[in-house]
Amino acid sequence: MTKISRRVFLKGAVCGGISLMAITLDPFLLSGNIAFAERSTQPLWKPDTSRNKIVVVSDLHFGVDDSFAETVYNRKYFVEFLHRLQGTTDVRELVIAGDFLDEWFLPLNYAPVSNMNEFFIRIASNNQLVMDELKNVMKSGIKLVYVIGNHDMNLGRDTLEHLLPGIVQFRDAKGLGRYITGDRREIVIEHCHRYDPYSAPDRVSNRELARSDETMYPPGYFYARMGTSWVMEGRPKITKNYPVLVKPDVADSDQMGAYLYGKTLEKLFNRITEESGFEEKIFHMDSCGLHGAYSLQDMYPVNQPDGSISAPVLFRNFQRSWDKRQDMNDVWTKIPFLEAGAEAQSKAYFYKCAKEQYLGKKRHPYDVVVFGHTHVPDFQQDGKKFYINSGTWVDYNSDYPPATRTFAVVKTGAVNTAVLYQYTDDGSLYDMREQVNNS
């Protein structure tokens, strides 16, 4: 199948220029080409006679303020999706696999958050229609499950239970969770940020600075804050002159790790060219163990007087914390920093993680792994085993422009089947398996 953009696909579908045969023949599917108000009462597909399907959504990114939140336009579609899910009587569980209520996507001028519980309650209030519809999902008999993500790693168990009484939460290490489900406990669902050194909870690197066990934000939190402001500024292209690192001896894995981290930041911040200066104290913190103001310079690795590479304040010797972080973050099969740091931006890396951590385990019958986090939908099948990335519902998916509003459906039983869908503008479901395999 030729790769096509979402806009071209939808235009072709309306004009009849693209065949919808794959959609209409899918056993999960019921066409949604009806008026918005009318279609909201229709099930998503023709249900089986038993509750044997697990639906996974992730990376919803509902925000505290619609002026900068990533999911505003798509919110009405998600509410409609939830309403129709209630009438899809073979759905056993709806799993929200992380990045549900967003604490990271905040502009730099947003006031420091000092009370996380109150902050998440404000996010929920700003998205009250979603919260109400999720309560209706539970009332319909569908089990609602939450697995924590990196953008909501400080969302407390009691706070979420207060917001959604009856939701089932799966957490293991602090700021992380994995959910094992299915008739044979053959399905593993997690956000997968524990394998990303730039997004996994970091209770090591800044502990001495914070003098607190509460510190948990990884570098990705600071990227997200700068990225939000950059987007609000209109994505300006500004030439930046960052410190130049001297490459160490390739045989020195420790310093090569530090160099890799520095080059990763260089590439990132030459793309996210937010208007503030390198030495400007732009990160105003009063949460997660950090209090005060910090600059990009404070976290940027440079060659120190002794020749070693390290950031001066935040995330000093960042590469050295990774091994201990994996222990604290309950990573079952450890990944070297040079591998994780270099490959964590690729979808192939997370498929490899799924195989190493779960699908390849001979002593455990894991047949299906569903991740989120990357915003890049993926679907891989190897015999009777499946790997799926459920993608995202943000309004504009900059990481994979052809698609947003994507989700996974896994049928449990003696043998699993699985589908990756996009919820389209007209309410129909587009089977994305072939498209993501060819991308």
Image (cartoon, rainbow, N blue to C red):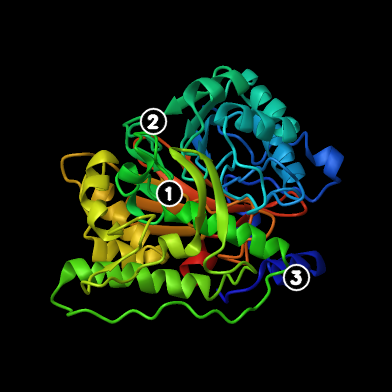
The relative height of residue 236 versus residue 226 in the rendered view (above or below) is below
Tell me the mark number nearer the camera, choosing from 3 and 2.
2
Mark with earlier residue (3, 2): 3
Q: Quadrant of residue 12?
A: bottom right
Q: Nearer the viewer, residue 170 or 226?
A: 226
* Residue drawn at (65%, 54%) of the image: 24
Tell me the mark number nearer the camera, choosing from 3 and 1.
1
| Residue 269 visible in the snapshot | yes
* Residue drawn at (68%, 23%) of the image: 136
Q: Nearer the viewer, residue 45 or 252?
A: 252
| Label 1 secondary element | strand
| Label 2 secondary element | loop
Residue tagged 2: 171
- The residues tagged by marks 3 and 1 sit, at their Cα atoms, a distance apart of 30 Å
Q: Nearer the viewer, residue 393 or 435?
A: 393
Specify the amino acid type for callout 3. Answer: Gly
Mark with earlier residue (2, 1): 2
Q: Residues within 10 Å of mark 1 (few under 14, many from 20)?
A: many
Specify the amino acid type for callout 2. Answer: Arg
Residue tagged 1: 371
- The residues tagged by marks 3 and 2 sit, at their Cα atoms, a distance apart of 43 Å
Residue tagged 3: 12
